[in-house]
Amino acid sequence: MELGAGAWSYFGDPRAIHHDGRTFTGWISTTGNVWVASWIPGRKPRKNLIYRGLGVDDHNNPSLVFRRDGHIVVFFSPHSGHIFPKDQVSRMRYRTSLHPYSIAEFGRVHTVDTNVPGGLGYTYPNPIQQRDKLWLFWRGGSWNPTFSYTRNRRDDWVPARELVHFRDDQRPYAKYCGDGRNRIHCVFSDAHPSSWKTSLRYARYENSALYAASGRRLGTFAALPLHTSKLDTIYRYSDRGGRAWPHDVALDREGRPYVVYTRRLGGTRDTFYYAYFNGTRWVSRKIVEAGRMRQSFTSGGATLDHEDPRVVYVSRRVGTWHQVELWYTADRGRTWSSRRLTDAADGYSIRPVSPRGLRGARNQIVFVRGDERTVGFTDYRSRIHAVEF
């Protein structure tokens, strides 16, 4: 099913959420506008244009979250840093649906008017609803993972804080997931793998402190930001192993975290890995090679099934094009079975997303589909698609 012309990047999440048979997603269009859509399998999708002129850049995709009362909050910001955005001020904006579990109407545009110093704006919104707090994580003014939260609907966000840092000229990349109650699980690289020999780190937020998977306390909020070297190490860089980049973190029914990430060797070859904590240490196991890269993107991306993290969806190059595949493990990554979910005749299929909240529903995957006309993150000729299986 085709949803609309547009794209998304890897690090603004959730890009798709689900409730009671209906899936919701959003994207940045090929003309730089923010769209959201919803659908019930077998029916025509509904779409709504909620913001014009954010900019033609695949980093600008919106992230969606259900508030406790079911209203949908959509966050979006321009790609920001030393160069972007051009010809506009970086702001983190959001709109809230006027009706629960509906995209028919939205309230006015609000802004998150807090950030850390540094002048590099807002990128990659990651909202998480945890009991009475709506948390928001993003890449902040100093290029580091940053956060705030609000307890109500009056737009009074607490002052932004940096969560972790590495060094002034580098930017850690982050993935987050919450348990809906007390814990938020975070995975970080030290930097972008094209510019640093990156390791992969983990931290769990709980009761105003950060913890390792073992339960060892890494530091309190008073000590923030923590240097990435002080975090729990999932994978430590080696010349033989390659440079790490996080793709997703999800929890099993016991609340234990699982991670999918890539390791890059030689600057051109990515391999997907699956990681979990065995009670003593983090274990990483290879899933599959990602295949040769394209000019417009490196890895095709990966996502865990957030209802069953034994399932991983990867986009890897098979022949001419990247295709989305389902990989399943019943033994924590020792062995894998797989099947193809997209057709090479349709071009490339990248950056798959498993909608969060699918428990009890049929499996779905939402992804970006395109062809050779896409040559970069500001010049894409792609469309958002969804498949059910």
Image (cartoon, helix red, strand yellow):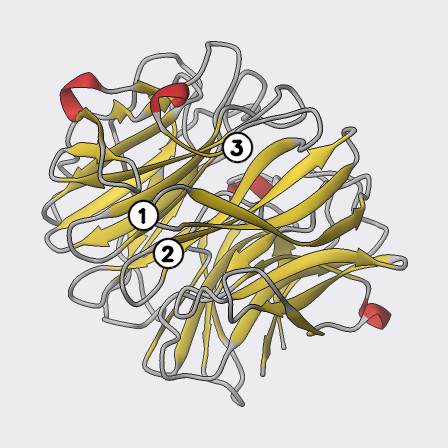
Residue 127 circle label: 1
Residue at far right of view:
320
Sequence-first tag of 1 and 3: 3
Q: CA distance from mark 2 to mark 3?
A: 17 Å
Residue at far top of view:
168
Q: Which quarter of the figure has residue 263?
A: top right
Three-letter code for the amino acid on which mark 2 is drawn: Leu
Classify 112 as above or below 22.
above
Is residue 163 toward the left or the right of residue 60 in the image?
A: left
Question: Which residue shows up at 71% across the image and 29% down it?
Answer: 240
Sequence-first tag of 1 and 2: 2
Q: Is residue 167 visible?
A: yes
Question: Which residue shows up at 53% across the image and 24% down it?
Answer: 191
Instruction: Judge the density around disc 3: few (<14), some (14-19), many (≥20) Cα neighbours within 10 Å.
Output: many
Q: CA distance from mark 1 to mark 2?
A: 7 Å
Three-letter code for the amino acid on which mark 1 is drawn: Pro
Q: Is residue 297 visible?
A: no
Q: Which residue is mark 3?
A: 79
User: Of helix, strand and loop, which one carries label 2?
Assistant: strand
Classify 53 as above or below 370.
above
Dot in front, 1 or 3: 1
Image coords of residue 388 (percent x, y): 57, 81
Q: Are marks 1 and 3 in contact (CB under 8 Å)?
A: no
Three-letter code for the amino acid on which mark 3 is drawn: His
Q: Are marks 1 and 2 in contact (CB under 8 Å)?
A: yes
Is residue 148 toward the left or the right of residue 243 in the image?
A: left
Q: Which residue is mark 2?
A: 64
User: Of helix, strand and loop, which one carries label 3?
Assistant: loop
Instruction: Judge the density around disc 1: few (<14), some (14-19), many (≥20) Cα neighbours within 10 Å.
Output: many
Image coords of residue 321 (percent x, y): 83, 58
